Image (cartoon, rainbow, N blue to C red):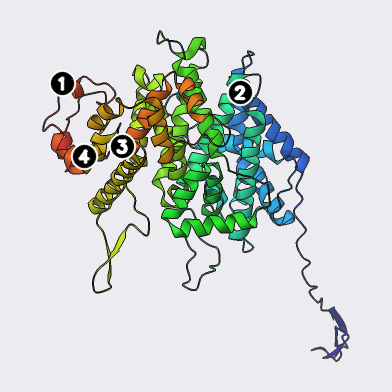
Amino acid sequence: DKKKGGVSVNSGGGDGGEPESKITKTETTPPTPPPPAIAIDTSAIQSLAKQIVSAYQSRHSQISSNTRTNDHVLEECDDNGSIERTLWPWFLHCATANNGSDGLSGGEEVAFALAILSNRRGGGSSSSSSDKGGGGGGGGGDPQLWFVVDDYNYAATGNSAGQQHQKSNNVTTPEQRTMAFAMLLKNLLSYQETNSEGADDNLSLVTRTEVVKFLIASYSSMELRCKNTPSDTAGGQQRRGTILEGPLTDLVGVRLWDAIPRRKRYLEMKRDGLLRKRYGLFDAKRKEGTKNVGFLPLVVVGLLDSIAVLGGNDDDGSSDNGKNDNAPLLRGYISKVLELLLDLLSYPQTRTHVAPYLSSQHLVVQLALSKLYRQKKFVLFRQQVDMLLDSERMEVASSGAATTSSNEGEVTTLPYNDIAAQQVHQRAHTLQKILHRHHVQETSEVIFAGVGRVSDGKWLRAQVDKWREETLYDVCYRLRLVDDDEGTNAVESSAKRLGCTRRTLLTSIVLYHQSSRNSDAAVLSTAPLYPTEQLLWDSHSVPPGRNFLSSNNESLS
């Protein structure tokens, strides 16, 4: 056999002596061409998003519409996997093509449509109870946000469900997923700011509620990570939280401190050098005159406004202020915002900057003074406010207050009770020094009292009631609890919104700041050994049916 130019020639006789010539072509395999680029039909995706948003808003619009048709549209998009097959791949493609840049036309409505479908998976918007202000889902957790970290090949995605779940070797990198999720959050919050203030109050409320539900699910899923992606660490395992944690913590990070009054911010940074250094780097990098405080200040303002509307501003105690049609939506929005604040105070990544901001705005004090809290009709609201009060007043020591040096030079960590007692003593001594320096005649009993008396709320209220209102405001100002220097009369506006006097609000702020919280041992000692009649007849504490109740003392132990 001779090979000539890829042609095999066989010359010679066969078995029968007859000459035989066979020419066989050997085909060489050409190199595999690169796969074609993913064709993203932006107009079709935006049209689908507009259809989803229109179907969802029609359910809550004041104009009567076919509810079954709108529900069918949402269910069909959910069953077809529109998130994994259309909406989320579009953000991945835009993040890869734009290299994480902020310019993304038409992404706001796509982000809101994705949030709507995602909340349906968590039981948020699909249940009728949540639409009426009930306590339905919204915090779906890992299954709800699993589309962010899955490893499916979106380039080979077809119409069949089998092709959608085929794995690919060319998976999206975690950095691309992080950029895509950051673009999703930015466009979603931009859509909320653009469409929250509309002529229809129902559409504004449902829009803000859906955004808050998606944020609750996102913060509860910060620990999600890719399973089959190459690791970027030396240990061989990817660090948890690298996909969602960065964009989420940045929203409530050091930028939130721009919303804190200047004097209060200086005091907080003076207590912790690490926070002062972090804010200095943030201030040096940003442009002059720019101020981006994130989404949380607008959420807090919307929460207080909704509580004022739902509680009513009249003196006869009437609720809802004549807007009974919006009352279920207002209750649902208020409960979801409080749930989001509780989650932000529960995670160490977000509590560092969120807790000082909420303390500077006196949010818990305003919630406790609101008429909605005093009416005792909205039981879930009272329970969430009490939980928020306990979570905000939890004594979490900073790096400087948590350690102490011994004589040998060793650094030891203080236990929790010692840290709480140390902070209570510091607050009491600071108050006594200010009173002794500026108001010695009027506040002599507080100056020469012990720390136990000064930190007792009942005794301190009796002494504060004897002070003049000008003295009370001056004490709050010197303690940096209130700050009206920046041209805004925050105390007056807050008291007017709550329907109370200026003195009542200032007194509550001082008592909340100075009084100490009860220890867990004191709360446990006052708990009854057996269920009381108040617990037995409380429908909000006892589940329906025949149940065996354990005492509070036994449960805590």
Of 28 and 331, the residue lying toward us: 331
Amino acid tagged 2: Leu
Q: Residue at x 38, y 30 (%)?
A: 471
Amino acid tagged 1: Glu
Check disc 1 and report the residue beneath it.
Answer: 533
* Quarter residue 2 falls in: bottom right
Question: Answer yes or no: do the residues labelled 2 and 4 have beta carbons within 8 Å?
Answer: no
Of 60 and 81, the residue lying toward us: 60
Amino acid tagged 4: Ala
Q: Residue furthest left?
A: 529
Label 1, residues with CA under 10 Å away: few <14, some 14-19, many ≥20:
few
Can residue 325 be spotted in the picture? yes
Check disc 3 and report the residue beneath it.
Answer: 440
Check disc 4 and report the residue beneath it.
Answer: 449
Q: In the drawing, what numbered circle is on residue 203?
A: 2
Q: Residue at x 37, y 41 (%)?
A: 392
Earlier residue among tags 1 and 3: 3
Earlier residue among tags 3 and 4: 3
Q: Give residue 4's position: percent from left, percent from top.
A: 88, 88
* Quarter residue 551 falls in: top left
Give the CA distance from mark 1 to mark 3: 49 Å
